[in-house]
Image: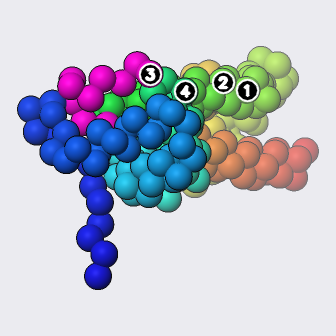
Amino acid sequence: MEEKRTLTAINGEMQRPADRALIERLRSGDGEAEEELYGILAPRLKATAAYFLGWQDPDVEDVVQQTFMAAFERLDGYDPDRGGIYTWANQICVYFCFKRVRRRKRLVHVLAQDLENLAGSAPTPAEDGRPAALREAVAALDEPCRSLVARRIYGGESYAVLARDTKAPMGTVASRLARCLRTLRKSLTTEG
C-alpha cells in the first residue's frame, strides 16, 4: 500500500526534503509537480471554501481552481522558511472566498433595490378616489394580508423592511403582498 504524501511544516521548516524538492519542481514548471500538489492540497482547500461559501455551493470548485491558478502564478513569492505551502495556499483561498462573499452582498443589495423599483409604490387612498371603500376593503382582509397591505399602502414601508419585520425572504413578502393585493382588488371591483 502506497503511503499518501502530505505537506507539513514544523516551525516554518518542511519536514521532508522531498517536500522542498516538490516546491523546486513547481518553480521549474514541472506539470507533474502541479498535479501532485493539487492532489495533496485540493481536498483541504475545498473544505476551506465550503466552510466560507456553504457545503453545496457551486462556487467552491471555482474558488479552489482560482486559488491554484493564483498560487502557481505567485509561486516565486512563496518562502518555505516562513510557513507551509498549505498555509500559504489556504490564505489565498480565504481571500477569494471573502471576495465572493462581498460580491454576493453587493448583488443582493442591487437585487433588493431592483425589486423595490419594480414593485413601485402602491397607490395611496387619495390617489384611489375612494378612501373609505379602500379602508373597508383592507379591514375585511384576513390578518396577515391586512397587516402587510396596510403597512405597504398607508405606511409606505419598503419590501426590505417588511421582510425584516416578518422574518421572511423578500421574495416571499413580495409574493404574499401581490396575492393580498389581488384579493383587495377583487373585493374593490365587486363592490363597484
Label 3: which secondary element: helix
* Distance in Å between CA atoms under marks 4 and 1: 39 Å
Label 4: which secondary element: helix
Please name the residue shown 63% across and 38% down the image: 149
Instruction: Give the residue type that dot 2 points to.
Output: Val
Counting residues from the start of the chain, the first of labels 4 and 1 encountered is: 4
Instruction: Give the residue type that dot 4 points to.
Output: Glu
Q: Which residue was labeled with disc 3?
A: 76
Q: Which residue was labeled with disc 2?
A: 110
Q: Is residue 118 left or right of residue 148?
A: right
Instruction: Give the residue type that dot 3 points to.
Output: Asp
Please name the residue shown 54% across and 43% down the image: 30
User: How many other residues sit within 10 Å of disc 2, few (<14), some (14-19) or many (≥20)?
Assistant: few
Q: Quadrant of the C terminus?
A: top right
Relative to 150, does residue 57 appear above or below in the rendering? Answer: below
* Distance in Å between CA atoms under marks 2 and 4: 33 Å
Q: Which residue was labeled with disc 1?
A: 114
Which disc, if any, is residue 106? Answer: none
Counting residues from the start of the chain, the first of labels 3 and 2 encountered is: 3
